[in-house]
């Protein structure tokens, strides 16, 4: 149990009241007169369901988010264990400072011994297990640098948020925090630099700064904490708490993103739907030409990033893959060309147009174990609002006739090669290939 003895006990009793109360509002009035919780020095972070007693919508959404799963989801877990083993535990606090910040603040991580398997990374404390959780984000009061988890945390019971006049009626103090309504808040963790050589491993915020969106006042939240996904209206009216007044904006806590590998549990349907929508609004394809000459089909395609506030893909681009598939079919619907198909091992075939980052280790080998990065061998992605013109071609034997040309832009969060590098047992996670955009045209051969 994480709660400090006395204050924690009072808090638990108090919250017992609140849980019961979701059933009947009378008890809460009594509960609200209970003594306020722990003094500053005994303050420990609270479990998300406790916050969820009064902030039901935030909790119902957050629990399916990747922030909630940041320490427990099996892909992170395998990479974390690998990084820990390869560094004799040295990298544990670095990784966990973003993936379970409370685990680090409470001193649970680094572990005494590098974990030898997933059973060793299960944390006894629920709030540490809860990854990037309510009480952590709402205790951030500042930062020292916009990268590598350089947050400054206030361990008092003041919760910081977007409102100037929030009144939590005695349960917690509230403070207006402009930082929480800014892209800088997200940048504290969404800029990942190599801990030794400083190479940018994730640079979503830098990409955002160059996107044109900051000048328009569009922030991360408008696309990732709002079911309108960046479109107007950008305000979602509602109540921020079962005990609070109507507000002109209550932000979504799904933190919707493209990675839906774990969005398959009951209750995550809404998140999954939003994720697929987000991916569909990210990019467009336009086939600008298709020719057949000298035994080769050539297809020209414009790929435009129209909806992401940063490059596509972004984030952990050493793992993420976005690529072009081009299929040409004859009148019978049989494929005469299929570029961008996966091979038998599920890897993207050579000569495919792939948007990703390839990093190399000290021996010059390409790896997804990004902590081994000594050099960025290539970084080819679609910058915000940019259009890249690609040509995809292949040899083919075509007779005269009309052919249909289909181009697809596909996304997946990690390759089988990556999963293999960290020893993920086959079949343990299913990583879907998700279509982001598609276009069709015809090719006439005389
Ligand atoms: C990754 C950090 C993060 C996590 C985790 C998080 N929040 Fe928030 N929360 C924010 C930000 C940022 C805002 C401001 C959003 C805005 O105004 O655009 C916010 C806003 C709020 C608000 C004001 C009303 C609203 O929804 O806009 C409440 C209440 C709140 N969060 C409670 C919670 C609770 C309860 C949890 C856990 C179940 C939680 N938050 C988890 C970052 C976080
Ligand atoms: C007993 C009910 C209750 C519990 C439990 C509770 N809150 Fe609140 N909280 C409220 C109320 C009421 C408000 C005010 C809402 C408003 O004014 O719209 C509020 C406001 C907030 C705000 C907005 C602050 C601002 O100034 O913008 C945040 C953030 C927040 N709570 C986070 C949390 C977190 C994190 C937890 C768990 C550690 C938590 N709350 C637990 C009732 C509660
Ligand atoms: C305390 C560090 C931290 C903060 C602050 C934070 N994030 Fe995250 N975020 C993470 C981590 C860690 C993950 C990845 C978890 C995983 O996949 O294992 C993540 C994942 C995400 C994802 C999912 C991406 C996908 O691939 O689908 C989105 C979207 C996101 N964050 C948006 C935001 C936004 C917007 C903010 C600011 C309001 C924010 N985050 C603040 C640490 C943080
Ligand atoms: C104009 C809307 C918009 C803004 C602003 C925006 N994003 Fe995104 N974001 C998207 C879309 C669309 C995607 C899906 C396409 C992609 O993966 O790039 C995405 C994907 C992501 C991902 C997953 C990357 C991947 O490819 O797996 C993360 C993490 C993320 N955003 C974080 C952020 C953060 C942090 C900010 C602010 C610094 C931000 N976003 C600003 C629209 C936006
Ligand atoms: C400064 C913050 C930060 C640090 C440090 C950090 N991460 Fe992350 N990590 C993130 C964010 C943010 C994302 C989400 C990016 C995205 O969705 O593209 C992420 C995503 C991931 C993912 C992808 C998970 C998935 O399901 O696709 C893995 C794996 C991962 N991190 C492993 C690690 C390991 C291992 C370390 C330490 C060597 C580490 N991270 C250090 C912030 C961090």
Image (tube, grey):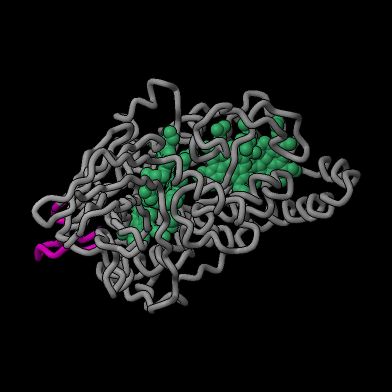
Residue under the point 30% across and 57% down: 327
Q: Quadrant of ligand 4?
A: top left
Q: Is residue 276 above or below residue 366?
A: above
User: Is residue 352 left or right of 440 when viewed as pictured?
Assistant: left
User: Is residue 269 left or right of 289 when viewed as pictured?
Assistant: right
* Quadrant where the N terminus is found in the figure: bottom right
Residue 366 magenta-highlighted: yes
User: In front here: 304 or 48?
Assistant: 304
Residue 233 magenta-highlighted: no
User: In front here: 200 or 277?
Assistant: 277
User: In front here: 226 or 361?
Assistant: 226
Question: In this view, which residue lies farthest toward the right?
Answer: 26
User: Is residue 435 left or right of 65 when viewed as pictured?
Assistant: left
Residue under the point 60% across and 28% down: 235
Residue under the point 45% across and 27% down: 218
Residue 342 image-quadrant placement: bottom left
What's the magenta region? 361-377
Q: Is residue 312 above or below residue 228?
A: below
Residue under the point 28% across and 54% down: 326
Locate residue 10, reporting x and y percent. Answer: 75, 52
Viewer can see residue 302: yes
Count of marks, rendered view: 0
User: In front here: 14 or 276?
Assistant: 276
Locate residue 353, reporting x and y percent. Answer: 22, 52
């Amino acid at each position: 149990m994480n709660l400090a003895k006395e204050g924690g006990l009072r808090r638990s009793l108090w919250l017992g009241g609140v849980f019961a109360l979701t059933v009947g509002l009378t008890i809460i009035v009594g509960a609200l007169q209970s003594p306020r919780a722990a003094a500053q020095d005994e303050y420990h972070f609270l479990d998300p369901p406790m916050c969820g007693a009064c902030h039901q919508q935030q909790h119902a959404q957050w629990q399916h988010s990747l922030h909630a799963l940041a320490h427990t989801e099996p892909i992170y877990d395998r990479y974390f264990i690998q990084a820990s083993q390869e560094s004799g535990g040295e990298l544990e606090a670095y990784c966990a400072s973003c993936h379970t910040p409370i685990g680090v603040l409470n001193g649970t991580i680094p572990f005494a011994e590098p974990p030898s398997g997933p059973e060793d990374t299960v944390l006894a404390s629920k709030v540490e297990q809860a990854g990037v959780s309510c009480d952590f984000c709402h205790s951030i009061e500042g930062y020292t640098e916009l990268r590598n988890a350089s947050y400054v945390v206030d361990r008092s019971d003041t919760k910081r948020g977007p409102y100037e006049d929030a009144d939590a009626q005695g349960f917690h103090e509230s403070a207006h925090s402009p930082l929480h309504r800014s892209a800088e808040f997200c940048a504290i963790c969404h800029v990942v630099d190599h801990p030794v050589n400083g190479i940018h491993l994730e640079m979503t915020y830098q990409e955002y700064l160059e996107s044109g969106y900051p000048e328009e006042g569009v922030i991360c939240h408008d696309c990732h904490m709002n079911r309108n996904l960046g479109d107007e209206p950008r305000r979602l009216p509602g109540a921020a708490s079962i005990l609070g007044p109507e507000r002109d904006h209550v932000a979504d806590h799904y933190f919707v993103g493209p990675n839906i590998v774990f969005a398959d549990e009951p209750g995550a349907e809404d998140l999954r739907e939003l994720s697929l929508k987000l991916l569909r609004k990210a990019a467009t394809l336009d086939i600008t030409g298709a020719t057949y000459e000298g035994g080769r089909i050539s297809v020209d395609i414009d790929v435009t990033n129209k909806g992401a506030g940063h490059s596509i893909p972004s984030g952990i681009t050493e793992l993420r893959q976005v690529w072009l598939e081009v299929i040409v079919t004859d009148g019978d619907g049989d494929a005469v060309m299929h570029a961008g198909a996966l091979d038998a091992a599920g890897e993207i075939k050579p000569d495919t147009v792939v948007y990703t980052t390839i990093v190399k280790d000290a021996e010059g080998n390409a790896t997804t174990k990004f902590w081994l990065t000594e050099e960025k061998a290539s970084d080819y992605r679609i910058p915000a609002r940019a259009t890249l013109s690609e040509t995809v071609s292949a040899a083919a034997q075509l007779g005269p006739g009309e052919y249909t040309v289909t181009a697809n832009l596909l996304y997946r969060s990690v390759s089988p090669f990556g999963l293999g590098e960290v020893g993920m047992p086959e079949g343990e996670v299913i990583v879907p290939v998700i279509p982001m955009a598609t276009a069709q045209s015809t090719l006439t051969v005389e």
